[in-house]
Image (cartoon, rainbow, N blue to C red):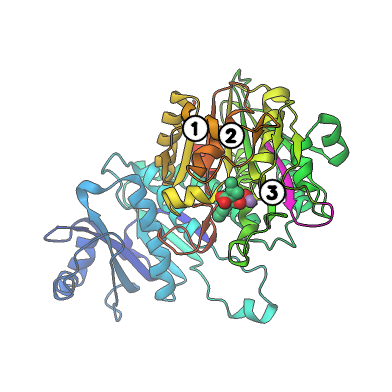
Amino acid sequence: MQISIQKGDILDEACDLLVVNFFQGIEKPGGATGAVDTALQGDLSALLKQDRFSGKLGEKLCFPTFGRLKAKKVCVLGLGKKADMTADTVRQIGGHIVKAARDAKAKRVITILHGAGMGGVDAELSAQMLGEGLWLASYEFHDHFGAETKKKKSSFPSNILMMESERKHIRPAEKGLERARILAEATVYARDLVNTSPRHMKPFNLMEAAKSVSALSKRIRCTVYDKERMERMGMGAALAVAEGSVNPPQCVHLVYIPKQRSKKKIAVIGKGVTFDSGGLSLKPADGMTTMKIDMAGAASVIGLFRALAEIDVPAEIHGVFIAVENMPSGGSYRPGDVVTAMNGMTIEILNTDAEGRVTMADSLSFAAKRIKPDEIIDLATLTGAAVVALGEDYTGIMSNNRTLVRSLLKASEAAGENMWELPLPELYEEALKSKIADMNNTGGRTAGCIKGGLFLKRFVDGIPWAHLDIAGPSYCEKETRSDTPYGGTGVGVRTLMAYLKSLA
Ligand code: BES
Ligand code: MN
Ligand code: ZN
């Protein structure tokens, strides 16, 4: 899909679909919509009235022009109330434009820089938001369909042109659009990794994806530790999780070196369980069908590096994940086992299905001991309890550092990704006690999401750290946002990029 910006008048160009907008609570259309209305001798405003078009966000009214305009069809898109408009509204508009274009079977689409000059949105930001919405919405995962089915799949518009009349807005808009392209490509790359069936996305494949991303830039290096090297480093916890699978674990360390030498070092850790059957504490059939998504944290780390291959940020970034498969077999680790993590702490396994925190004990220890970063941010589909507490659309953030939480919440808002903080109270540490080891790996029935966070906290060695439980938003089963289609979402990639941008 080609998206570009051009100086000119929307009425001068031929296209299959022209998309203009309308605010809720407005009497008469103005701007581009007003111009279309005038060209149609007021028929547009008459139609809006007749249709009781309210203008709420995402509402659409499409009609053919029968040769009265150069555009074959026009779509009026509701923007919601003027006072409610934010940058994310424009991103959502991008998603709705893709829907309107598909409904109209339009290949060539023309639209405007929606919302530019309002609610703190300038031409650059409007173009970035629109670009993100357009590209993120035009995603479908086709890899596993047979050749015949693939041919029949409906397609997306091939050409989207944003027309802007003022010359001074063209350069900034192009800049915003370029950032959108990079962020969307990185997000979609993470989605592909998540959507790939688990027999095609084993620990080896996830490691290879990280390697191929590192090959995109001279600023990125990738080191892989195989099972023997993990043994030598003392990663007894992650290795135990891997024991049930015939597919060996992989420990992956990516490094991004910024253009300007930077003193700040940030480590981003992802949970990389390529399939979570639960192990001997086997999941019920229904709970297992989507468990290919259990590497979504690692996928977002890889997606982040894909963006870093094209966008410079002012910090040294380390990406770490341990890829493992959690399977039941004669070799599996057992409930009752005690395992030792890389930092020397011992863990009594009460449930082999709480494997995420057991593997992350070693990836976090590796980061804290070997990398010694200034900050650690982890992303993990850690607990079903996070989905119970916050639902499918919110990431739970837990942290030992106020400043980091504040910055990440702000970044998530800029990225249009919902995030809410949960506490890490000392009070609940009790639940992690074990009579025979330093801790147990479940923490009991209540506050599961928080206890997962408290467990991880023990492995970051006091370094400022934030844990993002993405169990809900990593996967979309019911579409709630116009820019997020069914399947893996690539959640976190754009929040992290927004955070790294804010460091400048
Ligand atoms: N990968 C799951 C968490 C999960 C559940 C992610 C649903 C996405 C959707 C994790 O490994 C797990 O099984 N956690 C257990 C922990 C419990 C045994 C302490 C859970 O949440 O039930
Ligand atoms: Mn599990
Ligand atoms: Zn898991």
Extreme residue toward the right, this view? 228
Residue 488 spot, x, y in % from top left: 56, 57
Q: Is residue 38 left or right of residue 364?
A: left
- Quick one: 355 or 265, which is closer to the camera? 355
Magenta stretch: includes residue 330: yes
Amino acid carrying mark 1 in the image: Tyr
Marks 2 and 1 close (CB-CB < 8 Å):
yes
Q: Secondary structure at mark 3?
A: loop
Q: Secondary structure at mark 1?
A: helix
Marks 2 and 3 close (CB-CB < 8 Å):
no
- Quick one: 337 or 11, which is closer to the camera? 337
Amino acid carrying mark 2 in the image: Leu
Q: Secondary structure at mark 2?
A: helix
Magenta stretch: includes residue 369: no
Characterize the local packing of mark 2: few (<14), some (14-19) or many (20 or more) Cα atoms within 10 angstroms: some
Taking the spot 82% from the left edge, 36% from the top edge, the residue there is 230
